[in-house]
Image (tube, rainbow, N blue to C red):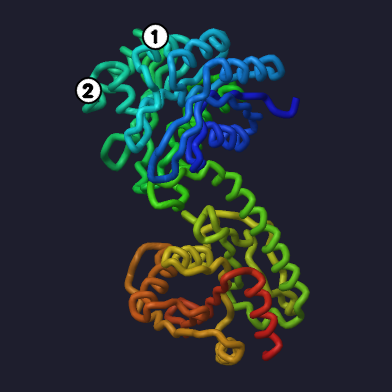
Amino acid sequence: MIKPVGMSIAGLDTGNGAGGETDLRVYEMLGIHGVLAVTALTVQNTKGIKDISVVEADFLRKQIETLIDDFNIEGIKIGMIYTKEQFQVVRDLLEPYFIVVDPVLYAKDGTQLIKDVEEYKKIILPIAKVITPNIVEASALSGIKIENENDIMISCKKIRNTYNIPYVIIKGGHGTGKYSFDYMCSQDGIRKIGYQRVNIKDTHGTGSVFATALTAEYIKIKDVEMAFRRAREFVQSSIEYGLSIGKGIGPVNVSVEVIKKSLKYEVVEEMTKFADFVENNEKFWLLIPEVQSNLAHSIRPEYVRDLRDIATFRGRIIRRWDRKVIVGHPVVFGNPTHTARMLLSIIFKGVNGTCLMNIRFDEKIVNGFKQIGYDQIEINREMEPSHGEGKTMQWIIDYISNEYGKIPNVIYDRGAKGKEAMIRFWTKDMNEMIEALNNLLKLL
């Protein structure tokens, strides 16, 4: 068996932000084959729900029976489930399974997603192995108005004891403050995970994604607490890279980790291509300064958050005594070189650049860049204030941005005491970097 199987019982979100179709994507991202039994079709987008068409209980029964007849289902996530009749079908067919319940009582726009909450409590909650309410939902299920951490703990225990649920996880994302916590109540007591609150509006689907990710991780490792922690990490990155689409509350980005891994693979391939160009160009030694060179290459700027998203050569780009240039493989991410720091500073200014190299200062090289069409600026390093280690590159970019309002591709200085004169050259992509340097070398 290549993939284990997980099921989702949920409605469909036509805006693809939450619901069953998002559950299937989360399962896929985490290595689970997802199957789906649909409870309702919602008419919605990022601005809210316009209408709901509920699936008849008999048709829901046929869906579930057909799936469990064929697949070895190892975990089930229950999301939107609307009527008492649907509740009973789910309980009759799925009670023995490992079930994670996301009690979606209301949508973000206030639309009621469970028609009869009292029947839901009686029929669905007792079959849950894990339930994942947010603070608002936990208040509704426990009857306790949650205003502080103590209220959360009391509510968590009350829900667990009232409905005999082994694990109750109350999500703290609806609270306030710089940091937030999720709380898990079990027979072993209460565990909590802290994380930095992300100031972003695109959070549609967080609850659904968390419950599905927890189900997926449990299927793989059969450990609820570890699945809780892994699901929390998955949701955090999905929120950080939320999709700014639509006119309302956009969905989280459940594909971000796979996307970033793919982008990093492309960066490594392009760095290898650049290394071949460098080592096979007989004039490249002319560009290498005394302190040697390095190339920084980032993934797409909109996905860059820190130096871990920028690659350099671990061993730098070195000019030997015989003018042979050697590239110091391997390609590594997160190496705090000057080139990586400057590229990060440029990207944080909103510039669409992904490559940057430090080059030997020479008037002929500066003029060569001008001949092939690149704007440039000279920086006086004597003006640099005293600051901590690693701040020089940021200071250069901040100074240029503040003084000139833009950041030219060629940034050079004539050095200072203890500082070699240097040219820094950035481009939007690797193809431009190679083409530009090739054209430059033809002029030297």
Left of 323 or right of it: where is 12?
left
In the image, is 179 to the left or to the right of 58? Answer: left
Whether residue 101 is situated above or below residue 296 in the rendered picture? above
Residue 23: give its label: none
Q: How many marks?
A: 2
Q: Vertically, is 342 above or below 56?
A: below
Pick whichever of labels 2 and 1 is earlier in the sequence: 1
Residue at mark 2 to residue at mark 1: CA–CA distance: 21 Å
Q: Quadrant of the C terminus?
A: bottom right
**Residue wearing tag 1:** 122
Q: Which mark is residue 145?
A: 2
SS label for mark 1: helix
Q: Position of residue 104 (x, y in %)?
A: 40, 27
Residue 227 seen by the camera: no
Amino acid at circle 2: Lys
Q: What is the three-letter code of the residue carrying label 1?
A: Lys
10 Å crowding of disc 1: few (<14), some (14-19), many (20+): few
Instruction: Compare residues 375 and 88 and report the one nearer the observer.
Output: 88
